[in-house]
Image (cartoon, helix red, strand yellow):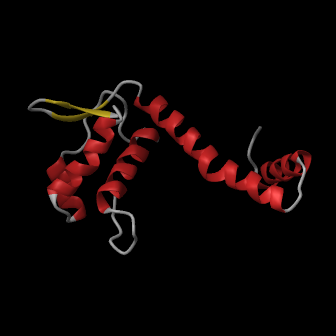
Amino acid sequence: MNVNSNIEKPIFIQIAEQLEDKIFTGVFPEETQIPSTNEISALLSVNPHTVLKGMNILVDEEIIYKKRGLGMFVTAGAVEKIRRKRQSRFYEQYIAALLEEAKKLQMSKEDVISLIERGYRNGGHSD
């Protein structure tokens, strides 16, 4: 994990996103403990309150939960929650913008689909 203080995104959000990504990719499996606020604070050289603020975003989203006296743990079902969240964001960030630009370029649905299929062929993605 690392934070970049030179970008506009607040550090606590960077921390939340990185923890979320580590949960999503299986670095921190469901129902296992994640590093403590103090451990992450020391690793990143940031204030523990900043780390806690980032963790609380994930608590609010029910991705992690606190076991009193033990620390923070990954919620069962967290990966699926993250997947649904990211799929929704994927549409908003990429598909809507793609369709808007395609409309400006007077591209048909078939033109857009053809470009996507070409991208899958050239990128080596499987269908």
Image coordinates for residue 99, horizontal then vertical, percent: 76, 51
**Left or right relative to 30: residue 125:** right
The quadrant of the picture occupied by the C terminus is top right
**Left or right relative to 68: residue 9:** right
> Which quadrant would residue 70 be assigned to in this image?
top left
Q: How many marks?
A: 0
Q: Residue at x 20, y 49 (%)?
A: 52
Q: Is residue 95 above or below residue 34?
A: below
Q: Residue at x 89, y 55 (%)?
A: 107
The quadrant of the picture occupied by the N terminus is bottom left
Q: Is residue 41 above or below residue 56?
A: below
Image coordinates for residue 109, horizontal then vertical, percent: 87, 46
Residue furthest left in the image: 69
> Which quadrant would residue 64 be assigned to in this image?
top left
Residue furthest bottom in the image: 6
Image coordinates for residue 24, horizontal then vertical, percent: 45, 39
**Left or right relative to 92: residue 111:** right
Residue situated in front as seen by the camera: 38 or 60? 60
Q: Residue at x 63, y 44 (%)?
A: 91
**Left or right relative to 93: residue 101:** right
Q: Residue at x 29, y 56 (%)?
A: 12
Image coordinates for residue 35, horizontal then vertical, percent: 23, 45
